[in-house]
Amino acid sequence: MSRQELLSPEGLRIDGRRANELRRIACKASVLNTADGSAYYEQGNTKVLVAVFGPREPRQRTALQQHDQAIINVEFNVAPFSTSERRKRSKGDKRLLEISSFVRQTFEGAVQRGVYPRSQIDIYVHLLQHDGGMLEACVNAATLALVDAGISMDDYVCACTAGLVDEQPLLDLNGQEESAINMPGLTVAVLPRNGSIALLQMESKIHATKLDDVMQLAIEGCKHIHKKLDEAVLAAANDLAVKLNNSVQ
């Protein structure tokens, strides 16, 4: 697909969105009874399920273990049916390990690990369907699951992608846009209250004169995603309150 086909003369993208529009977001917390915290997150056709366990005693001593704060373990898996190409990835797959590392590093700075000394927090991320924005969806789903688990954090961590087509910044890239030839793109994760950046990951080079525009567009997207995550947390809290009230009666 050529770069010209990604953006019509009317300014519309291949999925009908404007350059600064997010894909539809649907998310819900407390979707699993077997985990301490869980979340389902859907952005466009990208769908992610996350389960959080902990804080709990580390299963084994590792070089990463610290006595004064918790260690965060992230395991990322991709369903064989997540794309049209049927492919089963091993746990040692380089791309899986890379995404796991990005998610772990992002939350090591946001989780108040000092509250949980000599403990471990496990985050299991499962990509059910992939159509662009994989890393942002994983971060957003993990945030929702950690909040659901009651893990102390400095703030929500909200992530969004942005790219560049013919000098035009595009928000929240879908699968076709990400796979376009030489599509410059980046993923930004921020803590909304103070605006600090928790993650900045670039898939390809962006000219310095355009980097700020692309980054600011991604940050604006993060602000909108923050509202969606907050609504999901409030909905889960209301559901819990109703269940507790019914159990008392």
Image: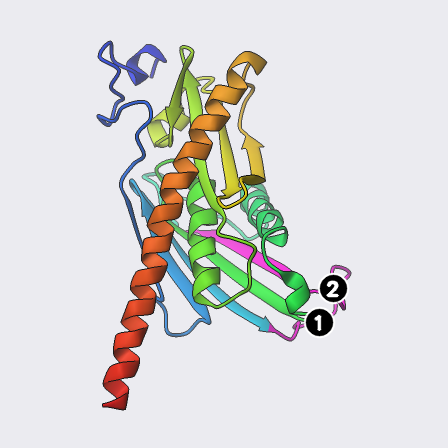
At x 38%, y 35%, the residue is 132
Amino acid type of disc 2? Gln
> Within 10 Å of the Cα at label 2, are there few (<14), some (14-19), or many (20+) other Cα atoms?
some
- Residue 49 in the image: state x and y as whole percent: 39, 56
Q: Main secondary structure of the magenta part?
A: loop
Q: Quadrant of residue 217?
A: top left
The residue positioned farthest toward the bottom in the image shown: 249
Residue 173 inside the magenta-drawn segment: no
- Residue 9 in the image: state x and y as whole percent: 24, 9
- The reply to whether residue 70 is visible in this rendering is no
Eye-nearest disc, 2 or 1: 1
> Within 10 Å of the Cα at label 1, are there few (<14), some (14-19), or many (20+) other Cα atoms?
some
- Residue 174 in the image: state x and y as whole percent: 35, 32
Q: Examine the rendered structure and indicate whether residue 123 appears above or below residue 92.
A: below
Residues under numbered marks 2 and 1 in contact, where contact means CB atoms less than 8 Å apart: yes
Mark 2 falls on what kind of element?
Answer: loop
The numbered mark at residue 1 is none
The residue positioned farthest toward the front in the image shown: 194
- Residue 214 in the image: state x and y as whole percent: 47, 23
At x 46%, y 62%, the residue is 147
Quarter of the image where the C terminus is located: bottom left
Residue 206 left/right relative to 232: right
The numbered mark at residue 118 is 1
Q: Examine the rendered structure and indicate whether residue 117 appears above or below residue 212.
A: below
Mark 1 falls on what kind of element?
Answer: loop
- The reply to whether residue 11 is visible in this rendering is yes
Q: Examine the rendered structure and indicate whether residue 210 appears above or below residue 58.
A: above
Which stretch is magenta?
A: 56-78
Residue topped by disc 2: 65
Residue 78 left/right relative to 114: left
Amino acid type of disc 1? Arg
At x 49%, y 60%, the residue is 124
